Image: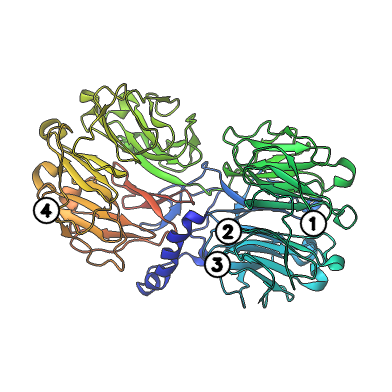
Amino acid sequence: MKAKLATFTLIAALIGSILSCNIPLPSGGQGPAPGGGAGASPAPGLGPVGVWMPCSYGMYGGIVQALAASPDYGVDKTVFAATSEAGIFKSVDGGSTWQAANNGLWIKQTTSLAISPDFADDHTLFSGGMHIGVMISTDRGNSWQDANNGITLLHIYTVVISPDYSSDHTLFAGTAGEGIFKTVDSGANWSAVNTGLGNTNILFLAISPQYPADQTIFALTSGGVFRSGNGGGEWQAVNNGLNTTDVRSLALSPDFADDHTLYLGTGGEGVFVSRDSGDTWTQAGPAGMYINAVLVSPDFMTNQTVFAGEGSVGIFKSTDGGNTWNGSDSGLAENHQMVSLAAAPDGTLFAGLYGGGVYTSGDGGSSWRDSKTGITDIYLGAVASSPDFAADQTLFAGSSHQGVFRSTDGGKTWEKTTADFIQVNSLAVSANYGQDRTVFAASGLSGINKSTDGGLSWQAVNAGLADADMTALALSPAFPDDQTLLAGSYRGALYRSTDGGSTWLDLNAGLPENTVTALAFSPDFARDQTLFAASYQGGIYLSTDGGGTWRDASATLPGLAVMSIAISPDFAHDRTIFVGVDNLGIFKSTDGGNTWNSANVGFPYTIYYRLALSPTFASDQTLYAAFVHVYQSTDGGAAWSPFGTAIWLRYVNSLTVSADGQFLYAATDGEGLFCMKLGGD
């Protein structure tokens, strides 16, 4: 989450300029309303030309930062999930299905939730988020309003609510650098309460179940644990017995007033327990684990049950107050990194995963079921179209946490393939896909993977690769004949295969060791043997002998952080190629990459560097560039203008035009896939 701060700071800075460009924005920060039920997305072509529509039906999952069940869950079956990039989702059927609940959330990087103890009557809940601060809903999450008066830093990691909220109207909010703020008027006004707080980077807050009487609240900071016994008036460090300051989660016993018990999750040291209100701590296991979430059973007084969500191996459960622990992850996804845990009053458990969405358990954690349908906090690194799209309507989308998805109806619906690898950064489809059904995927963790049955099954093809962290991939346009493809890695290695991926040859001689960001074949590769390789801070390199030798083609580029390459389909005649350079925009060459000229006329900022060319570029001279909005040029990049509605505050990782030229697809960093109709019926 913290790694996203720089990107979102830049995005926030763009808001005024985007507005000044008269770009139409989706109402309520949500974009076009999906149809067809929870989590559904309309089919491409149902919207008017030039309007982005969410196209992620079937792509479910995401990073679930926080969960909150209604205090009246037995009646309303309501639970909320706060996701890293796609905002808040709501379920009214116990987690079986979810719908976005983001009306009013203009930035959807949410981190925390706090639900009123009297939710059945006041319908109130609060959310915390990055760059948006604290938001309040008084209509069960249907709409949100700003509640930040007095908060001086709108980067909120954690929000907690008083158990006597209906009377004292009290909440606390922890910020990423300016400490803790308190309100006693339901969020109308806030004031800082940091006296004695030795560290103001507040990671987590936990409030006593008996707060009205004991006024106790705990704060986890980058400097350890702090406690206040007077409602935040003063704080003192309570770290006696701890051997780490990497503190991540905290849970108090429901009977804290009598048993004074609380559990602390740490990074690398497992769970600690205190039975004296935090004065001293004892390591309780599971040893060596990274505990991102701790949950104490609502019936702790009778069952002594505690759950610990670990960062890589799932959930642990103790039924003796933390003395012994056992795995409790039957039914969880294989890649079960826990981020958050919550319990409903009836004992139903909810687990929020890093990428895997939500799982629920109705038997005390003995078994879990996938409950992420409708949650579309999907990080997509790539989208690719079948060359026979007009006939087969096939698309592939690669995700950071869910592997590869496939659609055979133009993006209306998606199915998860059997790909068991994650962090998919690039996809490439064979030019003869209609016959050979071949697709390749580059993974940041698992190297190159290949499917020869249209994505139904995959196998690693890494013989000869010294890297597993692959970032870029490209197939020869003559792949059916020459079986040639290129792959690049994070550390800057470049590889070529001439046998369909069975073996690889290192091509790094003469190339800089910078992260490979993009690779491209000349459309006329069979004749001209021309290749391009781009890298971050390494510029762009050109080969005219199929990768045997390379030369630097960056001499006239003002910057070397080349992020994307797009080659004219008629390259053999027009010699045209475009590159997107980080923070400098788009540059064009009409001499095969020997010289470059700026092509940024019409952009409010020179950050539009995700590129896609029309399949008929030779005749229509149309291309597209994306960042958080798409611009179009119809004169070969001479001038640009806004095109379509904004993908509001969504960073675009990959942009592609369907092979028939009818649809534009944008793979986003946290909200799945968007599609736009370009023309036709």
Name which residue type carries label 2.
Thr
Neighbor class of circle 4 (other Cα within 10 Å; few <14, some 14-19, many 20+) is: some
Q: Give the mark nearest the N terminus, 4 or 1.
A: 1
Which residue does the image show at 50% across and 66% down from the upper left? 27
Residue 603 position in % (x across, y down): 28, 66
Q: Quadrant of residue 499?
A: top left
Distance in Å between CA atoms under marks 2 and 3: 9 Å
Residue 198 position in % (x across, y down): 65, 66
Residue 595: numbered disc: 4
Which residue does the image show at 45% across and 25% down from the upper left? 457
Q: Give the mark nearest the N terminus, 3 or 1.
A: 3
Question: Against 213, is 545 above or below?
Answer: above
Q: Is residue 394 left or right of residue 562?
A: right
Residue 599 position in % (x across, y down): 20, 61
Name the foreground residue: 522 vs 96: 522
Q: Are marks 3 and 1 in contact (CB under 8 Å)?
A: no
Residue 110: numbered disc: 2
Distance in Å between CA atoms under marks 4 and 3: 44 Å
Name which residue type carries label 1.
Asp
Q: Is residue 138 visible?
A: no
> For mark 3, what is the residue?
132
Q: Is residue 236 visible?
A: yes
Neighbor class of circle 2 (other Cα within 10 Å; few <14, some 14-19, many 20+) is: many
